Image (spheres, grey):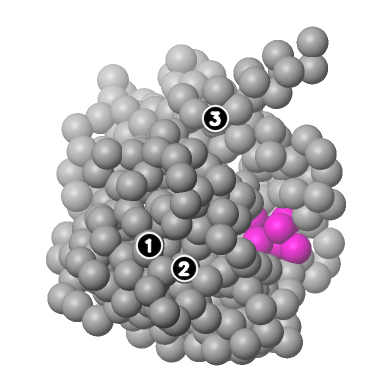
């Protein structure tokens, strides 16, 4: 389903204090420009679906962000309404229900959605990555079987690479898949699986061959169980027809998926930072100490300027990497690692500084800034730790000598 472009006008972000938490509202008044306006440099079409995403974040996500966090709710119906706008398969091909948008378009959408709820958007980004992997590496039967329901979010997907004993060293995974007749028999476990237990389709990296990355394959499987965050496979039978690509291609599929995943999660950090800068700015304008508003304190003025500068720099970096990935450039994987490293580090620092500007209030759950800090912190770990991102970049540099 293509993204709806029916809505028009300038998106509104910002903040206000509600009875129990802050809601994201207005970045600036209609027609007034801002140095951190995320629509700068976008085409008119991109501005339209950015507006749709901002409106969805404001109306459907922000009012419930605190409740979802406190009650650990997986907001199925809200996710399905997002899918009706085309956000369930943003960069998936239209013939299987996707929106067919670019990586840059995707980044713009995830940034906007994250201003409403970072953790929910992060799941949407992982779901999109899984659907793209099936769309890209699956055969016609697999694409037609899995992608339409996933794009509509009638079914939800999880990415299963990490194991209790293999995190950053993903190629050492031990979950095994032995071929018996027309099924693979899986044994092993996965850890830190986003949506694990609540989702329907699992894209699982498993070992069908010897040690190392060439012994890893990728299977797509369904799942029925009570919610959990670790997956345990005990003689689990998966049809051979569910093998993505060929045996031994799994590690490559996993890494290809993560290139886009790193742009996606960095975009979620951008949304958190955008909202946090706005929250900090609004707080400085109204909070008084020593007889005047904090906005008159030059130290805080300079801090706010640094936050805005780092936000815009991060956004430009992420969008450059997204374009490189879309164009399949030779430096795309390295740029994705660089952008993920830079943006998630800097955006977390922005959120953290915004909390500091709120003083003790920033630590209260009535104030949204603390949730942006908590939800953005994990982005330095997701889709490859930032230490691994440094390894990728340094290896690229040193290999050219």
Q: Secondary structure at mark 1?
A: strand
Is disc 2 placed on a helix, strand or loop? strand
Residue at image position (61%, 64%) is 246
**Image quadrant of residue 27?**
bottom right
Point out the image quarter for the N terminus. Answer: bottom right
Residue annotated with mark 2? 219
Mark 3: few/some/many CA within 10 Å (<14, 14-19, 20+): many
Q: Is residue 94 visible?
A: yes
Residue 107 among magenta residues:
yes
Q: Which residue is mark 1?
A: 177
Name the residue tied to disc 3. 389
- The magenta region covers 102-108
Which of the two discs, 3 and 2, labels the residue nearer the N terminus? Answer: 2
Q: Residue at x 37, y 64 (%)?
A: 178
- Drawn side of residue 5 relative to residue 222, left or right: right
Q: Residue 196's quadrant in the figure?
A: bottom left
Residue 53 appears in the rendering: no
The answer to which of 309 and 231 lies nearer the viewer is: 231
- Observer-side mark, 1 or 3, equals 1
Query: Which of the two discs, 2 and 1, sits closer to the camera?
Result: 1
Dots 2, 1 in contact, CB < 8 A: yes
């Amino acid at each position: 389903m293509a993204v709806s472009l029916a809505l028009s006008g300038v998106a509104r972000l910002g903040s206000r204090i509600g009875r129990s938490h802050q809601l994201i509202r207005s970045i600036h008044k209609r027609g007034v420009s801002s140095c951190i306006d995320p629509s700068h440099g976008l085409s008119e079409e991109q501005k339209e679906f950015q507006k749709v995403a901002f409106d969805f974040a404001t109306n459907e996500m922000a009012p419930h962000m605190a409740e979802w966090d406190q009650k650990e709710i997986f907001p199925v119906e809200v996710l399905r309404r997002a899918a009706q706008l085309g956000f369930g398969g943003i960069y998936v091909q239209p013939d299987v229900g996707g929106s067919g948008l670019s990586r840059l378009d995707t980044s713009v959408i995830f940034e906007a959605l994250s201003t409403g709820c970072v953790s929910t958007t992060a799941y949407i980004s992982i779901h999109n990555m899984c659907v793209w992997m099936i769309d890209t590496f699956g055969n016609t039967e697999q694409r037609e079987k899995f992608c339409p329901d996933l794009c509509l979010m009638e079914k939800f997907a999880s990415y299963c690479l990490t194991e209790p004993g293999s995190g950053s060293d993903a190629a050492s995974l031990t979950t095994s898949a032995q071929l018996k007749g027309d099924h693979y028999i899986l044994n092993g476990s996965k850890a830190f699986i986003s949506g694990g237990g609540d989702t329907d389709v699992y894209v699982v990296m498993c070992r069908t061959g010897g040690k190392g990355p060439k012994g890893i394959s990728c299977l797509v499987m369904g799942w029925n169980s009570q919610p959990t965050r670790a997956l345990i496979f005990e003689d689990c039978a998966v049809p051979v027809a569910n093998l993505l690509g060929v045996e031994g291609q799994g590690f490559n599929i996993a890494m290809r998926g993560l290139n886009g995943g790193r742009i996606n999660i960095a975009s979620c950090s951008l949304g958190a930072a955008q909202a946090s800068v706005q929250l900090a700015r609004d707080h400085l304008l109204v909070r008084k100490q020593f007889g005047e508003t904090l906005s008159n304190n030059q130290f805080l003025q300079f801090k706010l300027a640094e936050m805005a500068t780092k936000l815009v720099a991060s956004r430009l970096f992420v969008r450059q990497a997204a374009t490189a990935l879309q164009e399949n450039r030779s430096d795309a994987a390295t740029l994705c690692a660089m952008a993920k490293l830079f943006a998630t580090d800097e955006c977390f620092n922005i959120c953290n500084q915004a909390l500091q500007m709120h003083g003790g209030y920033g630590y209260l759950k009535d104030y949204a800034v603390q949730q942006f800090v908590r939800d953005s912190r994990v982005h330095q770990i997701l889709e490859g730790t930032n230490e691994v991102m440094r390894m990728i970049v340094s290896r690229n540099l040193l290999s050219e000598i």
